[in-house]
Image (cartoon, rainbow, N blue to C red):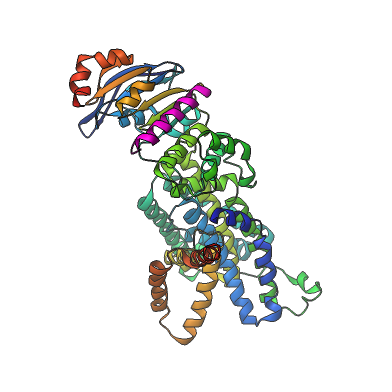
Amino acid sequence: MSALRTRFAGRIPWTLIVFLAALPVPWVGSRYDTFLATQIAIYALFALSLNLLLGLTGLVSFGHVAYFGIGAYVCGILMKTLGVPFIVAFPASGLGAGLFALVFGFFCVRLTKIYFAMLTLAFSQIVWAVCFKWNDVTGGDQGLPDVPFPDLHWMASLPGFGHFRIGEQFYFLTLVLVMLCVAALRRLSQSPFGRVLTTIRENPERAAFIGVNVRGYELAAFTAAGIFAGFSGALFGIFNRGVFADYVFWAKSADVMIMAILGGMNHFWGPAIGAAVLTILNQQITSITEYWPFFLGSILVILLFVFPGGILGALDAGWNRLVNRRHA
Amino acid sequence: MLEVAGLRKTFAGFVAVSDVSFTVETQQIAAVIGPNGAGKSTLFNLITGHLQPDSGTVTLDAKDITGVLPHQICRMGIGRSFQRTNIFPRLSVFENVQAAFLTHRGRGRDFWSRSETFYHADVEALLAQIGLLEHARSLAGTLSYGNQKQLELGLALASDPALLLLDEPTAGMSATETHDTIALIEKIAGERALTLLFTEHDMEVVFSIAQKIAVLHQGRLIADGAPQDVRNDPDVRRVYLGEH
């Protein structure tokens, strides 16, 4: 029953629907809503890239922020220090992050479980230390402030877009790029390659004995996840008007993992939902109290005990119960 | 087809397999028997690359495959099932077998097509052969124990092996399930002209289908030959069959 429904759900063009639903935000919402929507889109891509490892391949990476940060620095350095246009800097950020993921991942996939997780963390801390101290290139603890926005003046000539400022224009750019990345991620997770990754998640020993080169596929997944994390980092650096060493600090790896688990890592869209819910909750709660970490902790406790499958996992279970009752 | 020569494996001083040598001929049905802890599973793991031997060689069709990695051995035409059921529990039965076809046919690097469009006819034919077609859409983890064992056989067959290694294919099964499973294995081995090497604790099963039997005891090979010879071997009677 559930498998049938999954097949059916796979035919709905969700990426397009989400894109169309998110597109009108600058027209109907406030400038602040657009700001928030930009942040959600970027974090959603970051969390979805992590889920390539977490949900699909069953690899727990505590160092995913490294590739987010490398993407942000590559894009920031190219655009601010070297004056390279965004259209070159953006692909370069994914490429740079992917290269680092390939090199670090080469070592990480040689380990399993907690040792794998610890090594990803170790590499991300090395990246952080370098970013924090290499003043000439990364700006050290001062970071790289004032990363310029891409040139989006052409957008004003589109009908209906004339009155938007750079914040809204950048939202449209972000939305299009994020959705293209999400479509690619979705395609990848439904491909034969994605199916092989799920066999590694389910049972690496057996996967090897249907002929899967487990380490090779894990490295490919790690690199792909790094590339998309790099894209999200590049957008975040521009969105935040600068790139700073705390983007690469390991606590951010925990944030993105919470997003994936909160939304539901067994569903493709789970991490994106988690990113949206966590970002909105953070805004709402920090506006009334300074104890956001207390609420975050409480949410996590409830989640782990009551909804271990995350938001989408709980909805799915509720839906199944409803359907079964109707059939009973 | 398969030749094992002088295989030895120790774990922290404990000798699990010691100087084991035997051969399996093409299309032969061969069994390895022995009491618990005799080294049967270790022997299988040495053949399939899950363990590296301390010394000795494994040869498949005159090619030395000692120390080759499991996924490569699988591609060379050896399929296996495991003693503890080894499937992909949160994938459907269909997806389990389909994944095995995808990797065997070198489709795993395709990251752009939709995986659900591949090999429907082949997957369904194989599921029909192992008797699981009606469960195609169930999650593998929800199957009964016997059905999971059948699915594991299906995973091994999807890579179209020439040599199939089955580690206790009827472990934990009822008498009826055991009978059905053995009949199924025998039928498939005949249809696909497979060479079969299996371990089994049920002597009735072993003597009913094996053409050749190797007996392990405390890591050593104490007998190796036709069922009738093995049955009459005084060493075997003393250490093993005498227990019954």
In this rendering, is residue B179 above or below B5? below
Side of A180 where A307 appears, left or right: left
Residue B92: image x %, image y %? 52, 48
Q: Give the left or right position of residue A150, taking residue A143 as reference.
A: right
Up-down relation of residue A212 to residue A268 (above or below): above
Is the C terminus of chain B in the top left, top right, bottom left or bottom right quadrant?
A: top left
Quadrant containing the N terminus of chain B is: top left
Highlighted magenta segment, given as a residue range: B171-192
Disc count in the image?
A: 0
Report the side of A312 relative to B36 (left or right).
right
Q: Indicate the position of residue B75 as horizontal and vertical percent values.
A: 50, 30
| A128 vs A239, nearest the viewer | A239
For image coordinates 62% across by 40% down, the residue present is: B120
Q: Is residue B137 above or below residue A22?
A: above
Return the x and y of residue A62 as percentages of the image width and height: 42, 59
Q: Position of residue B45 (x, y in %)?
A: 35, 31
| Magenta region includes residue B177 | yes
The one nearer the camera, A127 or B160, is B160
Secondary structure mostly seen in magenta is: helix
